[in-house]
Image (spheres, rainbow, N blue to C red):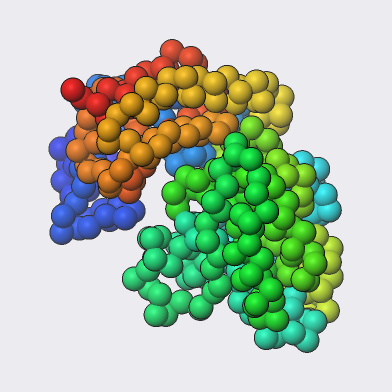
Amino acid sequence: MNLKNLSASQIHAIDQAHVWHPYSSLSQPLPTYHVTSAKGVRLQLGDGRELIDGMSSWWCAIHGYNHPQLNEAVTTQLTKMSHVMFGGIIHEPAAQLAQRLVDITPEPLNKVFFSDSGSVSVEIAMKMALQFWQAKGRAEKNRLLTLRKGYHGDTFAAMSVCDPETGMHHLFSEVLHPQVFSESPRCRFDEAWQPDYLADFEHQLINHKEQLAAVILEPIVQGAGGMHFYSVDYLKGVRALCDEHDVLLIADEIATGFGRTGKLFACEWAGISPDIMCVGKSLTGGYMTLAATLCNERVSDGIGESEAGVFMHGPTFMANPLACAVANASIELLLASDWQGNIARIEAQLKDQLAPCKAHGTVADVRVLGAIGVVEMNDAVDVAALQKSFVEAGVWIRPFAKLVYVMPAFNIEAADLSSLTAAIVEVLNPG
């Protein structure tokens, strides 16, 4: 077989025979769709059809695809240096990106550790917290408190702080480090605050504080664990309790960072700063895999005083120059745009055009925050069947569990967004 010029049928055959897709079975593979190119908010299929992308490639392609400024950043950097080890070496794209992240994230986060994926950035954050307390002579503080219905990644430490029962990783519960879980926040983002909403979290924190290295949570939006939007006051209360009981706070902003919720970072809704923050996904505008874990000087100084004297981690592709260069361009592009206006426009349109779903008997809830629109069904959906219906409607929407949702690029035009919402309304209520 000539692998340089594969036909559509050859690509499909190889896919079915050899390619293992995320959360899929090779014995009962789900249908896949052959994409040949992407531009703006459209995916071009091998059979000539175009799909309006409502997922921004798992929430990271915030500027759409094939953007000229991001293309230029990659090609310019490629002529200089595609990769170099980061041990003992610094380069301009990494220095620029570190300074940009320090400038735009909540103070006093001012130390940046680069990695190559969101899950790894969570692993790094957890390791930072553990090594910090080891340095303080408190090795017994080696567990984390987190929220049910949360999701933090697929690697082993990250899996241990995902929901242990309803999440995707309960099969591994016997081999994961046991963590402490509080109930998922009961207070919706737009509901009046009641002090008892924080009662279970406070109970868990106080009862386990001698064992807790840190609290880890997704601020304001619990993403892949259920797309829940919770109260600003809850996040404020968590920060206050962590301070009161000397427990570090880790904010997982991988899904929420870089404007998705209407703030540059979701922590800004509550006006708080974590001790450690994870960013990824849209960091590079969806072009390349890159993540970062930021911390304050208390954490970095503590680790420097540990037995090892250094932080014990070092990814091979840490601070890849191509990824750093396109991340710099993506952040510049975001901040130079009217991103807040775009998010407000998208939010208003999603609220208006998804509202009819509330009348469907199969729908449990409809909720919107920023550029996130969620329709929660009463029962788990048939992903393959629903996906096929959406493709036939000319849109790319990837449901999971009970959720049908969109997280489009920030520059999506109103007409294209209407196509996404109309497809959801029609497909979920075919009668």
Left or right: residue 219 versus residue 422 is right
Is residue 192 visible in this depiction of the protein? yes
Left or right of 191? Residue 263 is right
Closer to the camera in the image, 316 or 308: 308
Position above or below: 270 against 238: above
Q: Give how far across and how far down residue 173 sits, in percent.
A: 40, 75
Question: Camera-side residue: 326 or 151?
Answer: 151
Residue at position x 84%, y 63% in the image: 297
Name the spot of residue 427 as percent of width and height, x first. Answer: 25, 27
Residue 6 found in image quarter: top left
Q: Is residue 171 left or right of residue 321?
A: left
Could you tell me which residue is drawn at 54 percent across and 31 percent down?
371
- Please tell me which residue is depicted at 20% across the width and 24% down the height of the picture: 430
Which quadrant is home to the C terminus?
top left
Measured as percent of width and height from the top left, residue 258 is found at 64, 38
**Is residue 158 in view from this perspective?**
no
